[in-house]
Image (cartoon, helix red, strand yellow):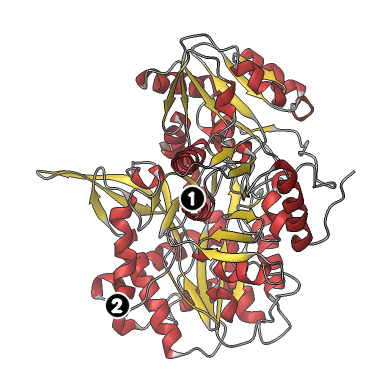
Amino acid sequence: MPTTPASPKANIAALRRLMAEKRLQAYIIPATDPHMSEYLPEHWTALRWASGFTGSAGTLVVTPDFAGLWTDSRYFLQAGQQLAGSGIELVKLVIPHTPEFIDWLADTLPEGSSVGLDGSLMSRQWYQSLEKRMQAEGIRPDPHADLVSPLWADRKPLPLEPVFEHPVKFAGATRKEKLARIRAALAERKAGYTVISSLDDIGWAFNLRGRDVPYNPLFVAHAVIGPKEAALFIDPAKMPEDIRRKLTRDGVQVLPYTSVTAYLGKLPLGASILIDPKRVSQNLPGAFPGGVKVLEGVNVTTWLKACKTPAEAAHTRNTMVKDGVALTKFFYWLAHTVGKQAVTELDAEARLHALRLEQKDCVGESFGTISAYAAHAAMPHYSATPESNAALKPEGLYLLDCGGHYPGGTTDTTRVISLGKITGQQMIDYTLVLKGLIAVCRLRYPKGTRGYQIDVLSRVPQWMQGINFGHGTGHGVGYFLNVHEGPQSISPTPGATAVMEAPLLPGMITSVEPGIYRSGQHGVRLENLVLCVEGEKTEFGEFQGFEVLTLAPIFTNLVKKSLLTKDELAWLRAYNKLVYRKVGRFLTAGEKAWVKTAMKI
């Protein structure tokens, strides 16, 4: 039996031996699973197994004489550190979330080569791009070459935690009502069926949640929804009997997870089936019988759940108060503890976790907390470890990017606080980031506006100083689901993916998070979540705007006041006043007095 190699270098060597046996000239390992998830159960962390890289976005390509990891600017520093000594080269993506490795393969491999991959781990969209480019060069892709499974001897099994219901009082609609809305949306698309693999869409559609994925309350499953029937494919051991009975009563069959391909093979001839090519694996549609009509587009569930109902928006506002209380109490503790007793990044993270769990209904973090002091904050996706754990000192900047899950919503907030002596450059950077945040938060824009049309506003203050940041300005946020959800985003790259073409619609919740990162020095990022709301109608059309949902102090001792306009200062004062009014009633007298001073300008 094969044994698990002890290091990435040994793993790559083992892959190359198996590639030679299979006569493959290249092998591809993406950072995803059959559900195209961002956060993965341990069972599907093949990229981590092969390379040691722990980021959520990356693609490994191995040839007989080269191994390279393609990832974006969020992970350049992290990947450089984690790949050191592995023999794997870091290849820096020019445009995030694009398959640039495909062009490299086409330009590098000779005609007649074969490229292997596990097609269940690559989206249909990416595979189609790969196949088209490879075939043009006389290269054959093989999507059924799973080389990892026979080598990964101690691979973790899939999780077996039971699913649980998302109460209707928070979900806002019953399962039957959601299924009816899905079928109506399918009918508008002239589709009879939809096949859904994305876990957030499945959780939303069936009012169920789980514990299979780190940070996201999701469970591993596939789903098929037809004109009258619906099927949920899940490990039977995960389904409590009382929930199974309710699903059956609502017209939902509960079938084994592994039976999805057999079910798809029996769909009616001539049926029209909608799939999302970005969120279904390449291998799954291969089970469709001949004669069916395949339609491609964003899942109708993605659009439906992106636009929060008025009830969901109201619950989210209440959730933001709870989370704001935890954050304010944390910053008060930090300001009164650093310099008086030892505090590390991990200590701070643990303290915040405890304070958040004190809030009613809090389930836990919505992603891995970024607790970053000084130069560590220059890494946008830094994660403190026992090896990197820095001691906080009464000087410089501390960046916190964190979020929580509650049945009534999901939060994602970034703030920067000074722990003592700061520099003029730090104040300038903080103020430039703040100007970008304010510009987007107070924007009014015509109906139909896309995120890429807005992105520039967060950058102009920086561009005027010859500065820029290497990530998007914002992402969609789910409702007790994923902290990163589409279809909308605020990104500088129009057309790079279908997501970036999505208009901002009333009810959508999106983050706004500009930043400045000076490697080896400091990082600044500020983040609010905003709700798209309807605005005024004029002779020039319908307008929309943003309601700021996040309720956390924006600390003003870092602000270089001369860089803010009167309107920006007015917005800042009004925002901090709102935070104080909403959050202050849940604070102690000492906390209230401190935060009022910390937000004064």
User: Is 565 on the left-hand or right-hand side of 119?
Assistant: left
Give amino acid for label 2. Leu
Quick check: 275 above or below 47? above
Q: Mark number for residue 434?
A: none
The residue that label 2 is drawn on is 564
Which of marks 2 and 1 precedes in the sequence?
1
* Image point (54%, 39%), residue name: 123
Quick check: 437 above or below 523? above
Image quarter where the N terminus lies is top right
Q: Residue furthest top?
A: 269
Q: Residue furthest left?
A: 539
Give amino acid for label 1. Ala
User: Is 275 on the left-hand or right-hand side of 247?
Assistant: left
Q: Nearer the viewer, residue 175 or 287?
A: 287
Image quarter where the C terminus lies is bottom left
The answer to whether residue 272 shows anywhere in this view is: yes
* Image point (71%, 20%), residue name: 244
Q: Secondary structure at mark 1?
A: helix
Q: Residues within 10 Å of mark 1 (few under 14, many from 20)?
A: some
Q: Position of residue 104 (x, y in %)?
A: 50, 55
User: Is 468 on the left-hand or right-hand side of 193?
Assistant: left
The residue that label 1 is drawn on is 106
